[in-house]
Structures are given as structure tokens and as C-alpha cells.
Image: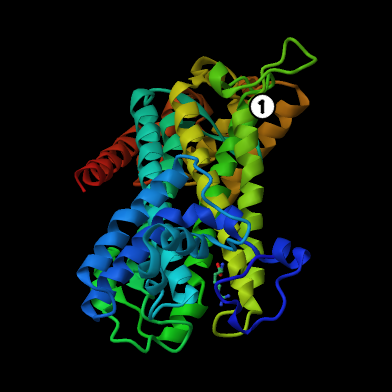
Amino acid sequence: MKKKMWDGRFESGMASAMVDLSFSLHFDQELIREDVAGTLAHCAGLVQSGILTPEEFKLVQTELPLIRDEILQGKDLFSAEDEDIHMALERILTIRIGEVGKKIHTGRSRNDQVATDFKVYLRRASSEILEHLVNLQSVVLKLAKDNIEHIMPGYTHLQQAQPILFSHYILSLFWALERDKKRYKSFLEIHNSCPLGSGAMAGSAFPYQRDLVAGALGFKTITDNSIDAVSHRDAALEFLSHAAVLISGISRYAEDFVIWSSLEFGFLSLHDSFSSGSSMMPQKKNPDSMELIRGKAGRIIGNFTSLYTTVKGSPLSYSRDLQEDKEPIFDTHKTVMVILRVMAEALATANFKFSVMEKKMESGLLATDLADLLVEKGIPFRDAHHLVGVLVGKAVANDCAFTELPDDDWASVPGFDELRRQLSFRNSVERRNIAGGTGSASVQAQIIKAEQIIRDELRN
Ligand code: ARG
């Protein structure tokens, strides 16, 4: 192996197997933007500390972004000796601007450098996810507004349970996403301090301009403890946890939409552009977009598990294990973004079959309403539940809807004639105009609240 930047005390180079284990350039070049921004902020501080002259800083300021852009455009400036993006950029810069390149790492360690880059990355990723969450919420809200008149069966245990408005169903996603947004917003609040100046673990020995550097990177403040700053990966863990919660929720809608796309349900036909065919069966149109969302949720939860496991046994302060924090985060960020995009576009273009939903509703959905109506007539709920249960049992035995049983069977139900007339899917929905319920006035109230949330988001 060629010489390394840190090899002053070493007699031999790194074994090739060790290189394979150790080098991280192939994945941490993802941090190139953050690393260049971090180095420029750090160097601005070095000018204030008297380590770099303004002219030397100018050189760095001119050359480093050029190097970044060339790499981003696909130019291969890397060499076999570059173990990570941080060393690579310093090496390339030094080739281009000479001695000044060798000064830029003054007062900094890769430990605080990486911790800073990573935090900046996580903050950007969280902001991007937040934007996509708002976008998906807007799609959901539009669906709810455009289809407020449609009734569908609501499910528990994947069995028809009670009639609901389609809008009520779809808005359930809106409110779950709202909590996901709150989690990412809180993330941005909590993880807003800059590690630079922490050095390897004990703090920089130079008159490091911590506030200036933090401000240049958009941080609100600086970290309070250098060991904390280089050791902890709670920001990454929290990011993964929020992603796992978010994706576990979305995956359930994906699962519903897979089921709805089946011939047996027939509630939904995804647009061709979010479906795939079969290589063998010409008739197939598969809801692959939803299956993939469901599948990728497993992978995000895997990323979550992987980093928690890595971090928990790593002694303080920095240990090299922590280099393993990058891939789960990069993968999670990209996967969450694509899932949110696909879900938004697939929903916006989907064909929901409202007439099928209505046709598939069976009268058992009204059993609770009948029991409730009996309660209103003064019968204790448990007795009412039993009376209706007996009716339903007879209907099952006769293979008909309980509402269609002959009057003889209804005779045990007091005032049945009038009650039967009140039983309809629409009435069932409208009896539930309680706040948060499926009645149309309640759902309108949800829509108004949701619209205000989206308006506020777009204003900010
Ligand atoms: N590539 C390393 C990482 O991401 C950089 C830090 C190396 N620090 C060290 N003390 N060897 O964690």
C-alpha cells in the first residue's frame, strides 16, 4: 500500500484484507457536500484563530468547491490510498494548492469532522423527508375532499365492521403523517448543535472559533461536551427510529391497497405506471408499487436494528465501529424518500372503485347500529347486543342478510318495523358526527383542520 496521511509511526502498510474492511470511501463519499461545507466553515474559523491567512483561506474557498463539483460530475479524482472522503478531499486539495492543503486539518480530528458532517446530513435528510410528508398529506387531503360522498365498509380483523366514509379512511393516513412530521420537526430542534471544536475527544487545543464555525454551518449552537459530541450517535438512532415508525405505518396502507387491488375486493385499480405485469401470465396486473413499499419497510427496520446493535456496545468516546453508522442512514434516507414519492403519486393516480366498495357492503355492518337504536329505546346494551346477535345468527343459518329476515324472526325486537327503516349505511355514518367520527360533518371538520395545517406548512 502507498503511504497514508497518518502513517508516521507505522512500519508496514495496511494488509489488503484490512483495506477491504476499513476503507469507507465507496459509501461515505455521499457526505461530500457536507464535508466541503464543514471544511470551509472550519477554515473560516482558522483565519480568525490566526492559523490561515485570508489569502490561504481564499485558495481553499476557491478550490474545494471545484473539486467537489468535479467529483459530483463523475470525474474520478480518487486514488487507491483514499480511505474515506475526508482524507481524499484533503489529499486532492493538497495536490492542487500545495502546502496550504496540509494546514486545513489543524485543530480538527476526523472524529469531530465526521460527527459534524453526519449531523448536517441528517438535518438535510430530515428536512427533505418533511417536505415529502407534506406532499403526501396534500395528496391524501385532496382525495378526501374530492370523494367525501363515498361510503365503504370499514374493517377490523379484515372483516367488515362498520360503514365509514372513504374520506375518513384516507384521512387516517393524514393524521399519522402529521405525527411523523412532528417527530422530524422535533429532531431538527434537538439536533442543532455543532460538534466541530471537539477534536478527537478532548476538545481542540487551538483558539477554535466554535460559534463562528457552527453558525456558518447553520447550527443554532455548539455541543457542550467534546466526549458527547464525538461519541454519541443518538441523532442517527433517532432518525432511524422515526423512519421505522413512519414506514411501519405507511406499509399498512400499502398492504390494504394490495388487498383492495385483488379481484376478490376490487376496490382499487392502481395506475399502470405504478403496477407491473407478469413475465409469464399475460393477464396479470400486479400492485408492485405497494408490495415494494411493504417490502422496503422491512429493510428500514433492518437498518434501525443494525445501527442500534452497533452503537450499544461501542465504548466511549469514538471507536471505529461508529463508521458503520453511515450506510443504514443513507439507505434509509433514500428509501423513505422514494416510498413517500411513490405513495403520493400512486394515490394521486389511483382509480378507487367506489361503486364496488358500496356493492360489497353487507348488512352485518348495521348490526351495531341496531343495537345502539335499541339502547336508545331503553334496552341495556348487553341485552340489545344479544338480541341482534340472535338475529344475525338466524340470518347466517338462512344465508341471508339479517335485515332481510321475515317479520317472525324480528318479533323479539321491540318496535322493529320503525327500527328497520332507520337502518341504512348512510344513517349509520351520519349517526357518528362525534368529533373524530366518520359522520360527514365530522369529516368536514377534519378536512378544515387539515387544510389549515397544509396552508401553514406552505406559508413556512
Ligand atoms: N471514516 C471514519 C468514520 O466515518 C472517520 C473517522 C476516523 N477516525 C479515526 N479515529 N480513525 O468514522
- In percent of width and height, residue 388 lies at 62, 37
Q: Is residue 315 above or below residue 388?
A: below
Q: How many marks?
A: 1
298 vs 6, nearest the viewer: 6
Tell me if residue 98 can be seen: yes
418 vs 317, nearest the viewer: 317
Q: Residue furthest right?
A: 280
Q: Residue furthest front?
A: 98
61 vs 270, nearest the viewer: 61
Which quadrant would residue 221 be assigned to in this image?
Answer: bottom left
Q: Is residue 256 above or below residue 228?
A: above
Direction from residue 33 to residue 81 in the image, left or right: right
Which quadrant would residue 54 be assigned to in this image?
Answer: bottom left
- In percent of width and height, residue 35 lies at 42, 61
Which amino acid, mark 1? Asp
Helix, strand or loop status at disc 1: helix
Quadrant location, ligand no. 1 = bottom right
Q: Is residue 329 above or below residue 366?
A: below
- Residue at image point 39% right, 28% down: 143
- Residue at image point 38% right, 69% down: 99
What kind of colouring is applied to the model shown?
Answer: rainbow
Residue beneath disc 1: 409
Quarter of the image that includes the N terminus: bottom right
